[in-house]
Image (spheres, rainbow, N blue to C red):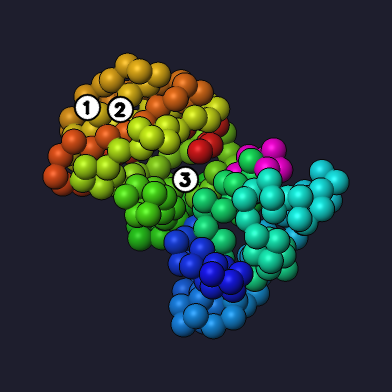
Amino acid sequence: MDDGAALAADGRSLRAAFPIDPGEVEAAIGNGEPAQTTPTMQAVGALVRRLRDEARLSLASLAAAAELSPGLLSQIERGMGNPSFTTLIKLAHALDVPVGRFFVSETKTGALVRAGEHPRLLLAEDNLVYELLTPHMNGRLGMIRARIAAGWSNEAEPFLHEGEECVMVTRGELWITIAGDQYELTEGDSLTYDAGLPHWYHNPRDQDAELIGAMSPPSF
């Protein structure tokens, strides 16, 4: 797959994590046409370039550290396309910054997100879908609503990141394992744990499960 196709595929996996007009995204990636520059992505690209310069990394070095192609990273730095949340996580880890640095900051006293406008973060090939309830991830608290596909488990690749998490199952059943200790949660049950310990989810049923979770600080 060439860099242009990779960027287009990458963008389809996370269109709503940034406040970009759907028409702009469709024009950029929906029809397989060359990616276009948007104001928000220009800001993200400029930030990536600045952080890379501050870290004294070449484009090729950062691309290798983030497991991206140099061509894809170059397009991101120029504000082209719409990188996926997974790509932003890789860049954040490679640059040693919180992934929330790439999200637009809210400067008002309150941050209202209307129903249907919450950013969606698609992970694990749509088996795990996060919907941000907070407007971004660069504050001290992050909240998500998650859908876990029937039968899905990430035991092979456990989550491991800083902070503390609390989750409550709102539909179905979910088994959560924390450093080898398994907890079986059904609707209404909640679990709080240290996210710095390896943890994974398993949906044992043949229907999707849903949860609401809070994390401090926000991280993945």
- Which residues are drawn in magenta? 94-99
Secondary element at tag 2: strand
> Horizontally, is 43 left or right of 205 in the view?
right
Badge 1, how many Cα within 10 Å: few under 14, some, many 20+? Answer: some
> Horizontally, is 96 left or right of 158 in the view?
right
Residues tagged 1 and 2 counted as in contact (Cβ below 8 A): yes
Find residue 33 and report its horizontal and vertical position in percent.
Answer: 54, 83
Measured in 3D between alpha carbons, the distance from the residue under mark 1 to the one under mark 2, in whole angstroms, is: 8 Å
Point 54% across, 69% down: residue = 1
Residue receiving disc 3? 134
Of circles 1 and 2, the one toward us is 2
Secondary element at tag 1: strand
Measured in 3D between alpha carbons, the distance from the residue under mark 1 to the one under mark 3, in whole angstroms, is: 24 Å
Residue receiving disc 2? 176
Position above or below: 53 against 187: below
User: Does the stretch in magenta take in 53?
Assistant: no
> Horizontally, is 35 left or right of 126 in the view?
right
Along the line of sight, the residue nearer the viewer: 77 or 140: 77
Find residue 66 and report its horizontal and vertical position in percent.
Answer: 64, 48
Position above or below: 108 against 214: below
Find residue 211 and report its horizontal and vertical position in percent.
Answer: 29, 39
Q: Quadrant of residue 201?
A: top left
Point 64% across, 44% down: residue = 92
Whether residue 135 is visible, yes or no, is: yes
Of circles 3 and 2, the one toward us is 2
Point 18% across, 36% down: residue = 204
Callout 2 amino acid: Ile
Secondary element at tag 3: loop
Image mark for residue 185: 1
